[in-house]
Amino acid sequence: MNKEEFISSGLLELYATGISSPEESRLVEECLAKYPELREELNQIEISLENYAQANAIQPSALVKKKLMDKIFPEDKPQEGGAAIVTIQPPNSRLFIFKLWAAASVIFLLASIFLNYIMYHKYHDANEALQLARQKMDLQDQSNRALKEDVSVMTNKFAQPVVLSGTDKAPDAVAKIFWMKNTGQVYVDPTNLPQVPAGKQYQLWAIVDGKPLDAGMIKTEKGIYHIQKMKSFGKADAFAITLEKVGGSLTPTMDAMIVSTKL
Amino acid sequence: MPQILKYTEEELVALLKSNDKRAFEYLYDHYAAALYAVILKKIDDSALAEDILQEAFVKIWNHFSAYNASKGRLFTWMLNICRNLAIDTLRSKSFKNQSKIQRSEKAVDFISNNVNEKEKFDALGIRIHLDRLAHDQKQIVNMAYFEGFTQDEISKKLDIPLGTIKTKMRAAILALKKILQPYVE
């Protein structure tokens, strides 16, 4: 078979389309070796078929290429477009989450400071009220105890009440003495004495065998005049109260006698 | 040499022999769609066809040293790999069980609307002109080139004598060449 006969036989076309039998293929390859010009003829046939295939092309999904490239070049995976987006995104979202946390923390801190401020004020107010209540309770307790003492003195079965009447100096003044007959203890009730002038203090005297003896200073601090314990006397002829300088005098100032009695 | 190539075929082959990644990407970008269409002629299932396409390109990359330029063009070699993988899949037991074997007639007038727009190669324009190709000529080329039927099978299916296949194929390809010529030059 010469060159022209071979070309027109169609064997090259069968060979190019892949349907030549093994014998035909062998024959084609022999002829290709013998006539190198046939190679160009075959090349042209292949180009025509290739262009025909290209004209019928259908794009596969883009995922095929990505999967293929990942499979063949796995070491390049992080640098590839699709993956690059993934590597850029996490820092962004991490930054976003960090910002979110930071904002939440600041809000929490401010709220906490505000609440602390309110709570501190509430605590302060409550503490103040408590202190006041305690003080008030202490005072009440004090006066309660004093009152109890007063009552216990007045209701004592050995108590002998002695009334001291006002003198010319203070006609309205009254004082009371509770004299315990069993012990000789003297209590004085200054409730109805006039208010003591500044720098002065009431002093109780017991007249024993015609002589005035100091029976103790009467406490009237803070304006409270309550029954109080004085000195003890086994016997006494009379009692008197004089207005003396603070701390008392050795002998009574007679013209400053407020109340007195004779037993 | 189709105009769509930036590399000459010799350059591309030399780069692929040296395992050049960019050359491989170029190879995929320029031939995957044409090869995918070939696989789709045999495999009705596009997901399965894409798997075969991927497998074919892995094979092309891993066995590129087996390509012998003196025996034919690169595309012809790649098309054979794809066609054989598709046929192997069809023959595989698991595929037969799915009974998804495609009837050959279905693929004869196969035309796609989905082409790579970036390509200068005017596939749509060519397709319009390919309509000028006689139906039986298209059939014979498609069955042999795309679908890998044997001469015997083509003879039976198209009801033409075995001895005339050679001349009919030659006539068909000559007609193809005439139609495609303005787009290639």
Image (cartoon, coloured by chain):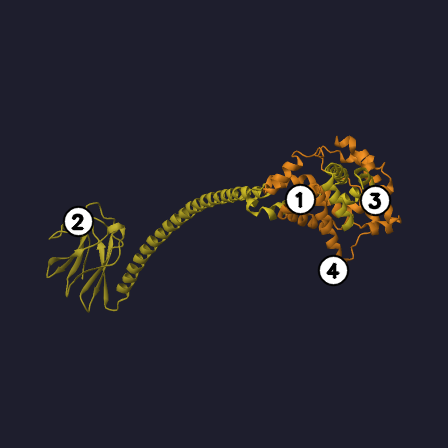
Q: Is residue B163 left or right of residue A237?
A: right
Which of the two discs, 2 and 3, sits closer to the camera? 3
Chain A drawing hue: yellow
Mark 1 burial class by Cα count in 10 Å: few <14, some 14-19, many 20+? few
Amino acid on which the number 3 mark rests in the picture: Lys
Pointers 2 and 1 within a single chain: no
In this figure, which residue is indicated by the disc labeled 3?
A: B166
Horizontal and vertical percent for residue B131? Answer: 84, 37
Identify the mark at residue A29; answer none if there is no mark: none
Check disc 3: other Cα within 10 Å, few if <14, some if 14-19, many if 20+: many
Q: In the image, which disc is placed on residue A246?
A: 2
The image quadrant that residue A163 belongs to is: bottom left
The residue labelled by disc 1 is B68
Q: Does residue A192 lie above or below A32 as drawn?
A: below
Q: Amino acid at mark 4?
A: Lys
Q: Which chain is orange?
A: B
Q: Quadrant of residue B113?
A: top right
Q: Secondary structure beneath disc 2?
A: loop
Which residue does the image show at 75% across and 51% down from the upper left? B45
